[in-house]
Image (tube, grey):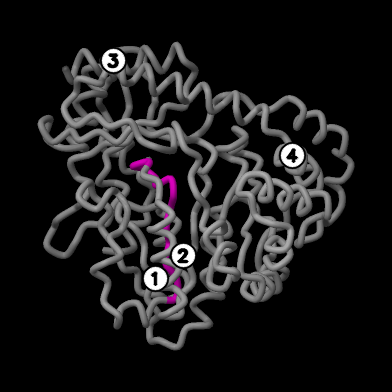
């Protein structure tokens, strides 16, 4: 059952829609692939350094890159230079690579048979793949409207927490867009230190938000005076419209990341040197990020204009997804099939992003995820078609 859960949700959707013709010119709202355009200045830097594709790059990253990431952390999260000196930064080939491979270290440090890995449900499929690869028991914590679309920390048993090697938390959450409060992160950090597990804070949507900028687990850790047990993962994919660049980082607990870097040195991919140079420039620039964020805000305003009357419509605090409850249309899967045939709009059933319980219950079965990643005109057209069907 668990192996079937890590199959691609997009392949499941292709299987669901096979043989069905779209009711209008197709618009795909399923994939969280930013389409606001890759910054031209980064393209020029890659071209400038193209000859360095002929060299093996350092796994720990060039100083220009790690310095740029550190300076971004200082600016974005108001972390002091003293706090920055206490943490370690490890460049990654995208956050997915780190979220999966770092669990090997966390699991090896946990004296439990097998170690448990806690994750939200629905979840990013890489979390489950990591748990299975590291021979851990995945434990799914429903993140529903009743829990604020984040795992409820209050009902977790001490025995389970004692067995945990790691706890995956995403803020803003994928797919619901919920943002963890400072109080939530403080409580989670307290549990991690009390029970001896690592927090893997997936923050790759941190720069896509409506109003208040999301708090990082690193900010809370810095305020506590220690980064012990805290790892934050971020990337340029969403922030800089660069999903194909495969560039990210992990930062936090220096002891853990020192051990992880030794592991990466023999088992994980290096980031090509031209990509490192371009990444350093991207982390150093905020203008392109602010421009992209304004486009997302405009698209959410259009969604409110066209779908705001839909019962239960919610504008998320962060991320670029709509998370629609389509129970009145038979749930996410049935609605996705009907909407494709009626409107030509492709949406992703929420159940494909969640684990079904032993009793058959799936916390996301009524929902569907819609990615607002296309240009304004295409987004408006897709939402207008949905409005004509849903309202």
Give the number of callouts: 4
- Whichever of labels 2 and 1 marks the residue nearer the N terminus, that label is 1
> Where 326 sits versus 358, above or below?
above
> Where 260 sits versus 174, above or below?
below
For marks 3 and 1, give the one nearer the viewer. Answer: 3
Q: Which residues are magenta?
A: 165-177
**Residue denoted by label 1:** 117
Q: Residue at x 39, y 25 (%)?
A: 28
**Residue denoted by label 4:** 284
Label 4 secondary element: loop
Q: Which mark is residue 130?
A: 2
The answer to whether mark 4 and mark 1 are in CB contact below 8 A is no
Q: CA distance from mark 4 to mark 1?
A: 34 Å
The answer to whether mark 2 and mark 1 are in CB contact below 8 A is yes
**Residue denoted by label 3:** 306
Q: CA distance from mark 3 to mark 1?
A: 40 Å
Q: CA distance from mark 3 to mark 4?
A: 37 Å
Rendering quarter of residue 390: top left
Q: CA distance from mark 2 to mark 1?
A: 9 Å
> Where 207 sits versus 119, above or below?
above
Disc 2: CA contacts within 10 A as few (<14), some (14-19) or many (>=20): many
Rendering quarter of residue 14: top left
Image coordinates for residue 44, horizontal then vertical, percent: 81, 29
- Whichever of labels 3 and 4 marks the residue nearer the N terminus, that label is 4
- Whichever of labels 2 and 4 marks the residue nearer the N terminus, that label is 2
Foreground of the two, 219 or 120: 219
Disc 3: CA contacts within 10 A as few (<14), some (14-19) or many (>=20): some
Q: Where the N terminus falls, by quadrant? A: bottom left
């Amino acid at each position: 059952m668990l192996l079937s859960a890590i199959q691609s949700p997009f392949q499941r959707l292709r299987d669901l829609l096979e043989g069905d013709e779209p009711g209008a010119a197709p618009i795909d709202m399923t994939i969280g692939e930013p389409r606001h355009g890759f910054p031209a200045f980064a393209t020029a830097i890659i071209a400038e350094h193209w000859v360095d594709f002929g060299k093996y790059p350092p796994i720990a990253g060039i100083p220009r890159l790690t310095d740029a990431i550190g300076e971004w952390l200082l600016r974005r999260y108001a972390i002091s230079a003293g706090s920055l000196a206490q943490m370690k930064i490890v460049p990654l080939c995208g956050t997915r690579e780190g979220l999966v491979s770092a669990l090997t270290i966390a699991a090896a440090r946990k004296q439990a048979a097998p170690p448990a890995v806690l994750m939200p449900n629905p979840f990013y499929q890489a979390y489950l793949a990591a748990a299975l690869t590291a021979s851990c028991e995945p434990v799914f914590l429903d993140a529903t409207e009743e829990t604020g679309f984040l795992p409820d920390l209050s009902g977790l048993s001490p025995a389970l927490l004692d067995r945990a090697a790691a706890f995956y938390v995403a803020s803003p959450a994928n797919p619901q867009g919920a943002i963890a409060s400072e109080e939530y992160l403080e409580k989670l950090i307290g549990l991690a230190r009390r029970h001896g597990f690592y927090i893997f804070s997936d923050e790759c949507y941190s720069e896509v938000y409506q109003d208040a900028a999301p708090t990082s687990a690193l900010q809370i850790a810095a305020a506590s005076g220690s980064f012990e047990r805290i790892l934050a993962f971020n990337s340029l994919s969403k922030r800089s419209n660069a999903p194909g660049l495969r560039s990210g980082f992990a930062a936090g607990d220096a002891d853990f990341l020192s051990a992880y870097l030794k592991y990466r040195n023999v088992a994980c991919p290096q980031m090509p040197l031209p990509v490192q140079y371009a990444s350093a420039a991207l982390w150093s620039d905020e203008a392109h990020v602010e421009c992209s964020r304004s486009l997302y805000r405009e698209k959410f305003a259009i969604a409110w204009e066209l779908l705001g009357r839909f019962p239960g419509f919610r504008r998320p605090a962060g991320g670029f997804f709509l998370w629609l409850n389509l129970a009145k249309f038979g749930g996410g899967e049935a609605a996705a099939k009907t909407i494709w045939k009626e409107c030509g709009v492709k949406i992703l059933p929420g159940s494909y992003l969640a684990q079904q319980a032993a009793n058959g219950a799936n916390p996301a079965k009524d929902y569907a995820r819609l990615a607002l990643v296309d240009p304004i005109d295409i987004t408006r057209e897709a939402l207008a078609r949905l409005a004509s069907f849903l309202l």
